[in-house]
Amino acid sequence: MINKILLAASSTGKAEEMLQMLLKIESFQAASITILNVMPQSRNPEQAGEQQTEAEQLLEKAKASLPAAKVTTLLRQGDAKTVVCEVADEIEADLIIMGSRGLKRLQSILQNSVSQYVFQLSSRSMLLVKDDIFITRINRIMVAFNSDNPSDKSLSLALELMRDIPGGELLLAHTGKKAGKTEPEADPVLSEAIAAAKRLNLKYRCFSQGGDPSRELCQLAESAQANLLILDSPERRPSIAQSLPDLDRLLGASVSDYVRVNAACPVLLARS
């Protein structure tokens, strides 16, 4: 259940637009929302005043766009990357929603990507919305399955949303080397998800595609016209290494890192 949402306000408005779509779903309408804007530190008083005015205007614009009663705004000063993580922990957010430039691999390091940093260090579920995608009403949700990792959190979130989407369609996608060996309906990796969809009388489609799991998943999401892609993105590093770079993710080797950059729809990275 998603009860607390942290929205990182963006100048493009894509994250806000995505949240508007989520708020059309009943299970999201009771959530409390904190809209955060982070000002860079400035030693110039005049410049700082202008920045604060712009930041406050951005917060008010974002708040006015959301048809929800439980909305608060928060203005902080500092490094956006660390402040987003800190505030998410302070409010115990169930979901962080952020815009993303969709930078690839080393670009995200060299250009100091906020979303990449938060994705790497936060243990909370994140919904990333790229600046160059078209946001549509959510009625087709794809859940990613991999035989090497469980997708319990992703499936649970998808089922929660699908119950409140009349006429919606649940898309169950198994990709990777062990996929594609049987008909999708007979794929053992999808069996529990199929059973859950049937119990809830949900409309669903199954996909089982071998090959590179990252690329195949992005292709399936695009061809099925998914409005939202959900995949588990477990925290793999010990707590002692939380402040250290995760080179595997930074270099784009993980499925979740590739998908967040290349998917043609918003991506929800689910974490327990």
Image (spheres, grey):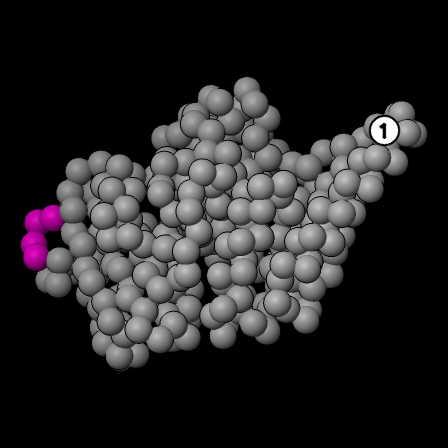
Question: Which residue is pictured at 59% across the width and 73% down the height?
Answer: 30
Where does residue 154 sit, x and y in percent of width and height? 39, 59
Residues in magenta, as a range: 179-183
| Side (left or right) of 127 relative to 257 | right
Residue at image point 56% right, 72% down: 29
- Determine if residue 87 is in view: no
Determine the residue positioned at 63% across, 55% down. 6
Q: Disc 1 residue type?
A: Gln
Please tell me whether the stretch drawn in magenta is mainly helix, strand or loop. loop
User: Is residue 31 shown in magenta?
Assistant: no
Residue 133's place in the image compared with 60, above or below, is: above
Residue 71 visible from this viewpoint = yes
Q: Which residue is mark 1?
A: 47
x, y percent for residue 191: 19, 65
- Mark 1 is surrounded, within 10 Å at the Cα level, by few (under 14), some (14 to 19) or many (20 or more) other residues, namely few
Q: Nearer the viewer, residue 220 or 4?
A: 220
Residue displayed at 69% across by 64% down: 71
Instruction: Judge left or right: residue 137 versus residue 110.
Output: left
Question: Is 270 placed above or below 1 here?
Answer: above
Query: Residue 136: x percent and y percent?
Result: 41, 56
Q: Observer-nearest residue: 149 or 162?
A: 162
Looking at the image, residue 54 sits to the left or right of residue 48; the answer is left
